[in-house]
């Protein structure tokens, strides 16, 4: 189970794990997982990022061909049936796989985790990726967060000694062997390669994850190049924010009206994003979408307001 914030190397790490498994146990590629050709956004992102990471590794073309090229949602993987709690794959009919990589594991609730574990074959290996500090499951059970709480207990003495021999680096051990199998399966990545620890985003992320409200305020008051605080206490400031949003989406809206190629519009859409913490109200998705969309003066047939509907 690998937990880490954005840019800490989760995908790169799992790509190297898969490469090591392929080099050690090279076998004919498994068929696509059930439902693998129909996927959600998270599955699509995993396929793209994992594929890019694997292409950078020194693998032969034959070894790269062993890596599955399609990802699936857990519901489709397990064969969820509409209108029923039953799954096609379960303890009596396990999944046909050797290694399963699960991304965004923080979103898995307790019932789904139970069904997933039940459906695994006895020899199956699972690599969970996620960030224990974000995207908690909607349903009951913060499974990833609860499991990762054991990371503070440290590795068992035997696992710490094994890792020290393998890496040549000192690995501190925890006390005893309580929940040893769980503790020894955890890895917490703390260094971000996307932004520095001393950057504004780095300071702010630490303060938020630590629950230090005073540190959050102090960080926002400092002068950083990558974050800025704009109070919206007056009507003029709110309108200025909307104008800034419209300017940020300007290139995307221009391409949309020009009926540009979809790939070009998607790339432009990703250059600027307006995130709302609320659904309703003037500062929520509905309020910002309604106000900013009305001011954008769309041409006939345009759906410019869709750009602002982000949470």
Image (tube, rainbow, N blue to C red):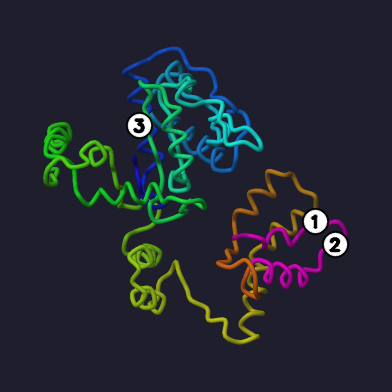
In the image, 262 versus 127, the foreground residue is: 127
Foreground pick, 138 / 33? 138
Pointer 1 residue: 257
Cα separation between marks 2 and 1: 7 Å
Q: Between marks 2 and 3, how big is the CA–CA gap?
A: 49 Å
Where does the image place residue 263, in percent across and percent down from the top left?
Answer: 68, 43
Residue drawn 49% across and 39% down?
Answer: 49
Q: Residues within 10 Å of mark 2 (few under 14, many from 20)?
A: few
Rendered residue at 63%/80% (across/down): 238
Q: Which residue is mark 2?
A: 299
The magenta region covers 285-311
Q: Which label sits on residue 90?
A: none
Q: Give the quadrant of residue 246.
A: bottom right
Specify whether residue 304 is painted magenta: yes
Q: Quadrant of residue 128?
A: top left
**In the picture, residue 261 is in which quadrant?**
top right
Q: Say which residue label 3 marks.
A: 16
Q: Quadrant of the N terminus?
A: top left
């Amino acid at each position: 189970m690998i937990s880490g914030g954005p840019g800490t190397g989760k995908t790169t790490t799992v790509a190297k794990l898969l490469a090591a498994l392929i080099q050690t146990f090279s076998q004919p590629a498994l068929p696509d997982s059930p439902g693998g050709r129909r996927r959600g956004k998270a599955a699509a992102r995993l396929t793209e990022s994992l594929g890019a990471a694997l292409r950078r590794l020194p693998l032969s073309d034959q070894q790269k061909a062993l890596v599955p090229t399609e990802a699936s949602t857990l519901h489709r993987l397990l064969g969820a049936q509409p209108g029923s709690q039953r799954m096609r794959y379960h303890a009596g009919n396990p999944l046909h796989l050797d290694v399963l990589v699960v991304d965004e594991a923080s979103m898995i609730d307790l019932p789904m985790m139970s069904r997933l574990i039940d459906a695994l074959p006895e020899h199956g290996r699972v690599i969970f990726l996620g960030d224990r500090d974000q995207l908690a499951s909607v349903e009951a059970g913060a499974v990833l967060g609860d499991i990762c709480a054991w990371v503070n207990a440290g590795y068992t003495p035997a696992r710490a000694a094994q890792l020290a021999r393998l890496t040549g680096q000192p690995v501190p051990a925890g006390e005893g062997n309580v929940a040893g199998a769980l503790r020894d399966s955890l890895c917490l990545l703390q260094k971000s390669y996307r932004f520095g620890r001393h950057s504004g985003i780095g300071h702010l992320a630490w303060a938020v994850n630590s629950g230090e409200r005073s540190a959050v305020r102090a960080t926002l008051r400092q002068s950083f190049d990558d974050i800025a605080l704009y109070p919206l206490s007056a009507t003029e400031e709110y309108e200025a924010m909307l104008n800034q949003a419209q300017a940020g989406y300007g290139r995307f809206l221009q391409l949309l009206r020009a009926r540009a190629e979809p790939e070009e519009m998607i790339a432009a859409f990703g250059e600027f994003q307006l995130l709302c913490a609320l659904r309703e109200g003037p500062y929520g998705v509905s309020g910002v979408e309604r106000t900013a969309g009305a001011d954008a003066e769309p041409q006939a047939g345009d759906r410019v307001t869709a750009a602002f509907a982000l949470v």
